[in-house]
Image (cartoon, rainbow, N blue to C red):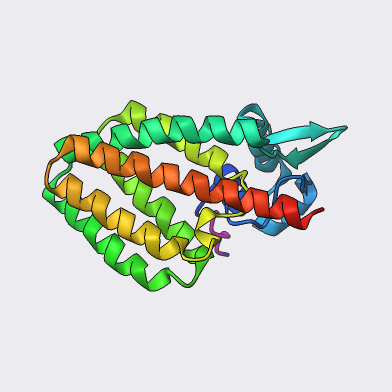
Amino acid sequence: MSQPKPPTKDAYSLILEAIDIGVYRPGDRLVESELAERFGMSRTPIREALQRLETQSLLERDGRSLIVASLDHNQMAELYVVRRELEGLAAGLAARHATEEEIRVLREMVKDDDALVGDPVALARANRRFHKQIHLASHNRYLVQQLDLVHRTMALMATTSLAAEGRGEIAQNEHAGIVAAIAARDEAAADKALREHISVAFMTRLKQDADARERGR
């Protein structure tokens, strides 16, 4: 009798991905039994994953329940400040250390992702992949670790800035400029281009939040 195949991802990764793609949103309650059933695994790895996510402040307590954490305005601003600095550093280091193969992959990603401009969810997923590729091209393991933490926390934002009208096309043009600077081995230009990219994303998100508050009145 054949044994069932183990899941390709562990419980932590599965829950984090579910938060990231909006299956679970800030304020949603996470229940061990429901998660175990959804992901087809026992409750023990689910419990351990929830504890890990709580330790990382991605989940928080609401009485005896664990809910997906949310970011207030100040936390979001603090996160974007750190992200801008680290992402810029990664782009600068990528301009110095990226292999020609890594640069070709980045170019291909930009070209492929242009087809996703009309689909904010798919484009957001591709955007994360693109940024991760730049992180790896920096060839600095400690920087990659810190950026992984920042991007995990970004999952707590209920919407993507790429959903704003026109933002997808603009972001893709910015991505092309970042890759061009990396390919030219211009560290300062790559750093500046990625910092500006993150700043525009932050401003877009601030406008989204302002609009949401206005609608909620």
Q: Is residue 86 left or right of residue 64?
A: left
Q: Quadrant of the N terminus?
A: bottom right
Residue shown at 54% from the left, 29% from the top: 78
Q: In this view of the protein, which residue sits in the foreground, 105 or 6? A: 105
Nearer to us in this view, 165 or 35: 165
Q: Residue furthest right?
A: 63
Please give the range of residues in magenta.
Answer: 2-7
| Residue 120 position within the rendered picture, expressed as x and y whole percent measured from the top left | 51, 65
Please give left or right for residue 180 compared with residue 193 in the image.
left
Q: Residue at x 53, y 40 (%)?
A: 152
Can residue 152 be seen? yes
Q: Quadrant of residue 66?
A: top right
Could you tell me what secondary structure mostly forms the magenta stretch? loop
Residue at (27% x, 67% y) in the render: 111
* Image vertical order of residue 124 relative to residue 131, above or below: below
The x and y percentages for residue 48 are 66, 35
79 and 19: which is toward the camera: 79
Tell me which residue sits at (41%, 55%) in the image: 127
